[in-house]
Image (spheres, coloured by chain):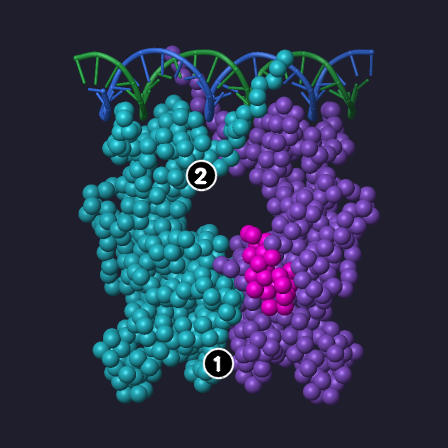
Chain colours: A cyan, B purple, C green, D blue
Amino acid sequence: MQTPPAPERLPGDSALLARTGDLFQLLRDGKARTRAELIALTGLARTTVAARIDALTALGFVGPAGEAASSGGRPPSRFVFNANVKVVLAADVGATHASVAVTDLNGAILARHSGVLEVSEGPERVLTWVIRNCRALLEGIGRAERDAAGVGIGLPGPVEHDTGRPVKPPIMPGWDGFDVAGYVRAELGTEVLVDNDVNIMAIGERHAFWQDHQNLLFVKAATGIGAGIISSGQLQRGADGTSGDLGHVRVPNGEDVLCRCGNHGCLEALASGPALAAKLRAQGVDAASGTAVVDLAATGDVQAILALRQAGRDMGEVLAICVNLLNPSVIVVGGSLSRAGDQLLAGIRETVYGRSQPLATSRLRIEQSKAPVDAAIWGASRMVIEHVLSPEAVESAIRSAALQSA
Amino acid sequence: MQTPPAPERLPGDSALLARTGDLFQLLRDGKARTRAELIALTGLARTTVAARIDALTALGFVGPAGEAASSGGRPPSRFVFNANVKVVLAADVGATHASVAVTDLNGAILARHSGVLEVSEGPERVLTWVIRNCRALLEGIGRAERDAAGVGIGLPGPVEHDTGRPVKPPIMPGWDGFDVAGYVRAELGTEVLVDNDVNIMAIGERHAFWQDHQNLLFVKAATGIGAGIISSGQLQRGADGTSGDLGHVRVPNGEDVLCRCGNHGCLEALASGPALAAKLRAQGVDAASGTAVVDLAATGDVQAILALRQAGRDMGEVLAICVNLLNPSVIVVGGSLSRAGDQLLAGIRETVYGRSQPLATSRLRIEQSKAPVDAAIWGASRMVIEHVLSPEAVESAIRSAALQSA
DNA sequence: AAACTTTTGATTGACTTGCGGCAAAAGTGG
DNA sequence: CCACTTTTGCCGCAAGTCAATCAAAAGTTT
């Protein structure tokens, strides 16, 4: 008996593309592709690709996208990711205001609403506001609640992401341990993911502008100062969900400044928005808040400019250590103070490039956030999207649909 | 026509255990298990489990482990991971000496050899020494070169792990960009993985003593001061492989000390072994090196004790920031200075617990390395083991064996 | 308009894999 | 020695992937 020639590819061998959900990942980039292109890309058989595309089309995850140019015969039909099968709800809750938005599955914002809302009013009232406005936005664009694939929520304090509960947040009285995810899920009936707002901004900024960077440090400088760490392409939340807490790190030249946390020399007491405003007021300048300082700097106010630059240096002292420790390829500075742009960044760059090891800084970029207002919404949306469009999630959606029809 | 009842589990549905390599992961813990236990653990069918065990047994990855107690019928046979199918070579190259070892697939050291060797002699000579001693060790325990599953090498400088090349290492003249992995692979003909020695020690320490901690910071305090970061259970190497470089971070009370890197106030200039020895010599104490300082402290020398404690405080200043940034659940302090134990750690603890946010430290442990000498070898071995026993690697081994026999 | 090219859908058979059923094997307890 | 239990090997079934084939569809080229 003669054995058949060993095939180059054993059946079931395509370990990376064993499931329909994996094929789908290729289409996630939004490019329209023909079946032939997908066959070349995956190495799967024609019938397999066709069957999987059919399954994805039946669920609405992909849709037809016209025809490609003919190369002398029947033109091939193309397929493209359908970012509108579902929508995603995104909420960014700040200390004194909140935003909600509806996005498609690309993270593009379809509708949004912002309002003044004190997080200190407690979880029930704040989340009720969020839920109500989510519903209103859905109604406004004519989508049903069941069209929502999930809700992403950013909160201004440490969050245990796995359970969706805040853990001892300093500025959120009444929220400690509250089951945010459960509360919202009970109302909206969808997947709910909760995280720290800085983490969410890091995710948003990375996906929007720095996709090819696997090691990114996002710094939010506003009322507080915090960082979101992306290492190996993955958000790092730490053991208790409190990673990136740079606000109360001690900086050298702030020994005499008392912080609201009770310690001396915290970065936040030196370089946060309120700290800068207080400093200028002490100099006789009328500055109510951090944004006022930024506005003053924009008009050319020398004291404001100097204060921002010094704040940048103070932050740089801390960031230099972060750079040596984490060796990121980019630091993105966001938050209300970052609108000052050059002034703040110049101070940061000056110190970081001076203090860090040449090896770690040779390819390091330090940039201003390119979308200070949208990053949080994008990140909240992106967190949900990655979850619900993951190979596993798509796979299980296909399987349950198959069960339904059987 | 009647549709058959929908099966609870569709074929190919066992997403998490689709492959034989995944079943193998369950057996990696070394516990002997019966087929029935594996069925319960995996949810796979009896025949499937049996077939996979057969495949793994054929390759030698698992072996029979006697019979379990009968519960009234035929006693079940048990299977256990066979850590001796292959051996792993591990090498730790330090500045002035090097170690090589052979371990089994559990990482247990079967044979080892250490010697005096200057890394500055250059890659060819050092690696030749490593290769020669690897061969000698293999011969000593009666194993062939082809029994080696791979080689793990730790080097005292930054390494681009993906390519296996050092990048601008400060104390390794002639090594910059040298293809370490390629050079060794050409000789020994196996997988070669290279990494920074601190990273490797972090891996070793974590696996040996802190398996349930997903966020660990390993600090090596010796001639230099560096850290290995494990976040989300994964070693974080940074964008250029230079993460954890804490030696040249500036600490507050060292402004007047000049570091060998040319800057002032580096942690290494204050708290490294040579720095402590120099400090004591300036005080009239005879201390040749960091280990001499540690020895003095062990005899109760007050100046040495004070110096170590202050070094701990200086390190603590930096580690406090690391804690706020990374929120690890444990910091392990290793390196030659860590043998000082209490003195150094007391200084570190004092500062870290004082400076870090209560949230980040409430569950933080700061401990001495439990195996200062073995951690590096264990880590180098572990790095290789995780690579060659990964589900993918096992899977492909099984597939290629199937092709061979066909 | 006819010939040619290319895509697409449908079908078939071979192969592989996972699963359940059945019977033999290998124990225990009376 | 004889039931009884449990494990284990073997076989057929169902499902999925793949390669191959055929025919229809939808273009281009002559």
Total numbered labels placed on residues in the image: 2
Would you name the residue on which mark 1 appears?
A: A252
Parent chain of label 2: A
Q: Position of residue B117 (x, y in %)?
A: 74, 63
Q: What secondary structure is marked by label 1? A: helix
What amino acid does circle 1 point to?
Answer: Pro
Residue A108 sits above or below residue A66 on the image: below
Q: Position of residue B259 (x, y in %)?
A: 59, 79
Point out the image quarter for the C terminus of chain A: top left
Residue B81 sits above or below residue A365 on the image: above
Dots 2 and 1 on the same chain: yes
The quadrant where residue B316 appears: bottom right
**Mark 2 and mark 1: span between their CA atoms?**
48 Å
What amino acid does circle 2 point to?
Answer: Glu
Residue B36 visible in the displayed image: no
Would you name the residue on which mark 2 appears?
A: A392
Q: Nearer the viewer, residue B314 or A157?
A: B314
Q: Mark 1 or mark 2, which is nearer the start of the sequence?
A: 1
A253 displayed left or right of B117: left
Q: What secondary structure is marked by label 2? A: helix
Q: Which residues are magenta?
A: B155-178
Q: Position of residue A387 (x, y in %)?
A: 40, 45
Residue A61 sits above or below residue D25 on the image: below
